[in-house]
Amino acid sequence: MEITISPFFAKLILRLNPFRRAFVMCKGYSDDYENFTELVWEDDKDLDFYDRETYPKFQLWLL
């Protein structure tokens, strides 16, 4: 299941997701504007989630 979420919720869920049953995905990561890329808090905590030009869309993927 894929749910479009705001940058605020993307950052919040990514930070508070201890069981890893939900995946925060980002379009535009590493200049990939066609596919979504999984974000990992340890690697992406400094990402500018509110930069809509660089990161235009976030989704929550549930298992």
Image (tube, helix red, strand yellow):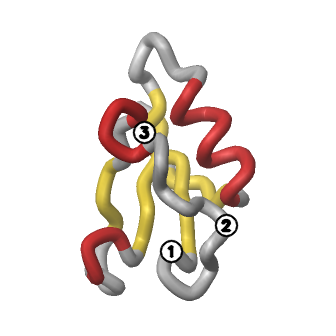
Q: Quadrant of residue 27?
A: bottom left
Residue 23, numbered circle? 3
Label 2 sits on what residue type? Tyr
Q: Quadrant of residue 52?
A: bottom right
In the rendered image, which residue does mark 2 sit on? 50
Q: Residue at x 71, y 45 (%)?
A: 9
Q: Quadrant of the C terminus?
A: top left
Q: Nearer the viewer, residue 18 or 61?
A: 18
Disc 1 residue crowd, few under 14, some 14–19, many 20+, Cα 10 Å: many
Q: Residue at x 73, y 50 (%)?
A: 8
Q: Where is residue 36 drawn, in percent x and y?
A: 34, 66
Residue 19, numbered circle? none
Disc 2 residue crowd, few under 14, some 14–19, many 20+, Cα 10 Å: few
Q: Where is residue 42 drawn, in percent x and y?
A: 35, 31
Label 1 sits on what residue type? Tyr
In the rendered image, which residue does mark 1 sit on? 55
